Image: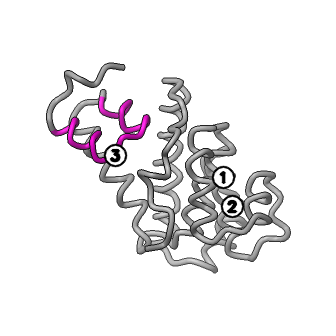
Amino acid sequence: PDVSNLPEVKQKTLAAVPLNIVRICAHASLPLFEAQGQLGRAVAMPEVLEPRLREAVILRVAHLSGSDYELHHHIPLGRAAGLTEAELAALASGSYARLDALLAAIAQFTDEVVTQLTPADATLARLRKLVSDEILVNIVLTIGCYMSIARLAAVTGIERDVDALAHLPTSLD
């Protein structure tokens, strides 16, 4: 879609973060555009979720949603956050037996929230033993944020960003 007639505030955001998902979001009402941007920036903060765990959540959402757009961006970000090739493969396949207990619990929890809305009691109990209530809620909000992005990307058919990593953080700095 043409972005040349968008308000200046949206134009400034697009200039700073020229990603296709931001271009599509710019066609939302200003309150939703700003709120989605704020949520995305908050989710990316390392104090919200440790980057390795955040990327595991996002990758499970992307795999379960069939979101090539998100996978294109977040597989490299997952590597930069410390996910190994074996962990990335496990997250891609949904086979968590070789993951550490925390990563496996987060991946299983994410799967169940995405596919069933609510996790099984045992899944929730396992994760609650490993994380605080704050982290648990942050995981759920991250799942929701990236489910929304995956669906927006799918509905609009946006293309992958060729130079996406030039506009995204690729380290833990």
Q: Amino acid at mark 1?
A: Arg
Q: Camera-side residue: 11 or 152?
A: 11
Q: Amino acid at mark 3?
A: Val
Q: SS class of the residue under badge 3?
A: loop
**Which label was assigned to residue 107?**
2
Q: Position of residue 49 (x, y in %)?
A: 48, 69
**Quadrant in the picture for the C terminus:** bottom left
Few, some or many residues within 10 Å of mark 1 (<14, 14–19, 20+): many
Q: Camera-side residue: 110 or 29?
A: 29
| Rendering quarter of residue 52 | bottom right
Q: Tally the marks.
A: 3
Q: In percent of the image, x 41 and y 51: which residue is there?
A: 167
Q: Are marks 2 and 1 in contact (CB under 8 Å)?
A: yes
- Marks 1, 3: nearer the viewer: 3
**Quadrant in the picture for the N terminus:** top left
In magenta stretch: residue 12: yes
- Marks 3, 2: nearer the viewer: 3
- Between the residue at mark 1 and the residue at mark 3, the CA separation in whole angstroms equals 24 Å
Few, some or many residues within 10 Å of mark 3 (<14, 14–19, 20+): some
Q: In percent of the image, x 53 and y 24: which residue is there?
A: 157
Residue, disc 1 = 60
Q: SS class of the residue under badge 1?
A: helix
Q: Is residue 153 left or right of residue 2?
A: right
| Rendering quarter of residue 27 | top left
**Which label was assigned to residue 17?**
3
Q: Is residue 73 left or right of residue 5?
A: right
Q: Read off the magenta span.
A: 9-26
Of label 2 and label 1, which has the lower sequence position?
1
Q: Amino acid at mark 2?
A: Ala
- Between the residue at mark 2 and the residue at mark 1, the CA separation in whole angstroms equals 7 Å
